[in-house]
Amino acid sequence: MKALLAILLVILPATAHPGIVEDIQKQLTPFTVLRGRFQQVKTIKIIKRPLRSSGDFVLAKDKGALWRTLKPALSAIKITAVEVAQIKDGKVGFRMRAEDQPALRLISKVLFAVFSADVGELKRHFDITGPPLVEGRWKAELKPKEALVAKVVAQIRLQGGKTLEKIEISEANGDRTVIDFSDVKLGAELSGAESASFE
Amino acid sequence: MNRPRILPFILAALTALAGGLLLWSRARGTGYETDLMALLPTDSRRPLVSQAVGRMAEAGSRRVVVLLRHRDIEAAGRAADACSDALKGRAGIAHVMSRLEADVFGAARDFYLPWRYRLLTPAQRERLRQEPDSALLSRATQSLYSPIGPPRLAPLESDPFGLFTENLLEAASRSSLSATGDRLTIPEGGGAWVVVFVELSGHPASIAEQQALSNALDAAVRAAKQAGAEDVLRAGFVLHSARASRQAQREMSTIAVGSLLGIVLLMLLTFGSFKPLALVMLPIGVGCLLAMGLSRMFFERLHLLTFVFGTSVIGVAVDYGILYVSGCADPTRVWDAGARIKGILPTLGMALTTSLVGYAVLAALPFPILREMAVFSILGLGGAWLSVAAWLPGLSRRMPDVHLGPLPGFLERAHARWPSLDRGWGMMAAIAGLLGLSFWGMTRLRPDDDVRRLFIPSSELMREQERVERLMRLPGAGQFFLLSAPDEQTLLERSETLAEGLEAARRQGHIADFQSVSQFVPSLRRQEADRALMWRRIYRDGALASKLFGGLGSPEAALLARRQAEVPPPAPLTPRTWLDSPLSEPFRSLWMGRTAEGWSAAVTLSGVGGPRSVEALKELAGRQPGTVFVDHLFDLSKMMRGLRIGIGRLLVLGHLLVAACLFATYRRRTWRVVAPTMLASLYTLGIFGLTGQNSNLFCILGLALVLSTGIDYGIFLQDRRAGDHRVALLSSSLAAMTTLLSFGLLALSRTPALHTFGLSMLLGIGLSWLLGPCFRGNETS
């Protein structure tokens, strides 16, 4: 976990394709809270049947993200500025705290950036390319800038319109994860229960 | 009697030999030793400990670490690159690393992959023993479904439960260093330090190389600061060595120039003529040449501090020449070189003997640096003495008419008015009063025997070093475990048992961390036990792997996983395998291999707590055979204390012995010769106590030399055979002044040991010189 996430965050901003990044930024609706459902299909080389899971998520601009898998089993991942934690049956599966790992602030920033399609932040770590927008719909291909990251992540594809609709992660080992988002709604603030889970 | 005729030729031959040796060693490039570690005494009773300490010091001495800080880690990274660019390609620097260039992690994975079925962490072992299938299964399934989770460092069929990955990640996260992007960082407070590793090509062979290296590092620090680093810390042995040699060179030239200028001035003030000056300079030159040349026969490389100390011997070596030359100030006799040398030879002989005995005591101690200093000084004094006896008479058959300068008259007047014991009770009372004060001062002596503080003055550099060691959790060189066993595997097993105890000690806060070979290479017995456990719980038909892959709808993957797990690795994982891999590079010094006690290894510790923690560690060592907790610095300090006390006692005995020897010559006047030196030593100790100076071994050694040198002035003064008492007064005063000048300059040294040495000699010799005339007596010979 630590290594992957640490590796995800490689530094040195460089100018990527400025056109596409700005186009996407113009297209996306700014939000404070974003809620929705997701469908994930993970393909692992040796396992014939793709692993399907689904659930819902909440993104809060200045709090973090809560990723809740409902099927096939209930579990949750919480990403905040101070920690990344996996919660299962009320128990923490793994946890990384910012105090142990100063890179975490950056890690959560990047994860958050991926899930909220924050291309402005992502272009610091990835080369972003994509075709011109067609009727407000956009596609972007992200290639890691650093060889170390490339060893784990081959590429990431994002696609959407006013909101992010699809993430496709191709790992260097051949595994692929496709996440489709649906029922994405903008919200004004977090519910009490949601706020509590970010504490 | 043709001995006197041969003597000049013997000396000429020796001088030629010394010159030859000096040139030869110059040509071979054997420069000075500057390594501070070489100064520490060796523990001859425990060669294995010395060997382990040596290995660790050697490994550490080739590394320099620079830490840079900035609120913004990217800015710190840019400063790290600037620092690294400034160092790359500079002489003496083998490698600089400011970012992770090689895939260290991938290399570790590739190395351990063949043994993935026999490696478990303690927590994993516990989990596989205790947890039910359901818990283990749901954990594995969840991480497969999770959109973000640990990367898989092995294909799923090779590591379905992510144990291998977890093992490697845990090993990586135990380091004080973490990876932020491709930077190695150390978190502290709200921010982080970026680490730059510098590897040196080897020990810098010469001082010039060392200085070049140190300058390059200084330039790199400046470059990092210019690039925006808010704070920079450095650590590395070479930095201290470079600083110490710079300082030693400075002190050496101060002492040499100061002493020589003083001698020139004194001689001119006394004789007002150049010939006597030239005559006293010659023995100094010969003494220096012999000391520097002939010492190469005993030591391949001399430590720079030996030269610092050796330089101060100029002030003593000049004494013999002064005694000889002073004869020309005798108004009662016509100068006759042959008669003069004959007249003073017994005195010269006695002075040399007492000095040599003093330095021989130093040479007998188990301190390599003291042995060097003693041999160097003995050769220098011997050379100076011989050249006085052999060459000066031949060179001074005729002396110019001397017009005595102002000094002899001044000395004479001062001497005439000097308080004397024989003139009344006042002086007696003063001496007794001071003695009482000194005894009170001596009760306040607080000797500090810590060897660390002997050679390295506390400085900003030292504080930086300590901070880096704390931040990086670098192992302390002095405290470690030394394990021995009859064979390799038993050694690993003992190391594993110790590691369990150390884990507990770490949780209790006794240590911050430890490093042991068993963390990288488990014993074959443990590997086999872990393999059996994994086979039983995971890979065996119907076990967890079957359930996992069955649940995912790919039962054939379980078969694949089982087949793979059945295949034995191509070779066993042994220390040899690990040592042959570049992965072990930073840790190789831990493994000592075959030793006199079978097989040995060190387990290093970092952040060892106070005395209670040390007790806990000692207790750990007592739990199994072949395990010793070494507290090297403590042991050395204890040895220093032992030597201080032992030599202190010998010193008391030495005074009595010297008195006994002198009794043969001086009979009832013996006390007059001995008392000044004895009182001087006592007063010196009193002053040390009253002023809070460190009265460690080096203070006592200084007093040993006071006994051997200070007594000379008493001898010069009391010896009436050499001629007029004014000549005796002149020669002893000049000798004392030159000696005081040299050791006074040595007392200015910033090396604590030399400072203490110089100060105790300055005080001791100065006081014996001042007290001498008080005991001169009224009777005329």
Image (spheres, grey):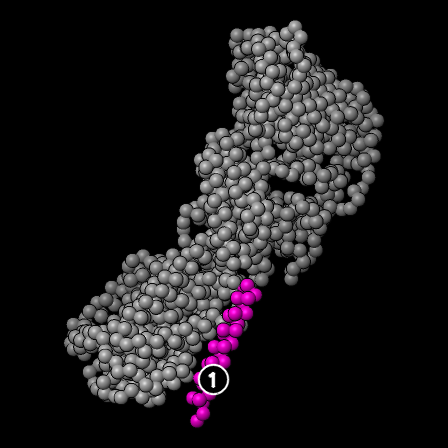
- In the image, residue B383 sits, relative to residue B626, either above or below, namely below
| Residue bearing mark 1 | B9
Crowding at dot 1, Cα within 10 Å, few <14 / some 14-19 / many 20+, comes out as few
In terms of secondary structure, what is the magenta stretch mainly?
A: helix
Q: Residue at x 63, y 7 (%)?
A: A136
The stretch in magenta equals: B1-30
Is residue B26 in the magenta section? yes
Q: Secondary structure at mark 1?
A: helix
**Quick check: can you spot residue B130?**
no
Where, quadrant-wise, is the N terminus of chain B in this rendering?
Answer: bottom left
| Residue B661: image location, x then y, percent | 36, 82
| Position of B198 relative to A5 (above/below) | below
Q: Amino acid at mark 1?
A: Phe
- The picture places residue A169, in percent across and down from the top left corner, at 69, 21
- For the point 65% across and 26% down, the residue is A144
Instruction: Looking at the picture, tell me which residue is in the foreground, B566 or B186.
Output: B186
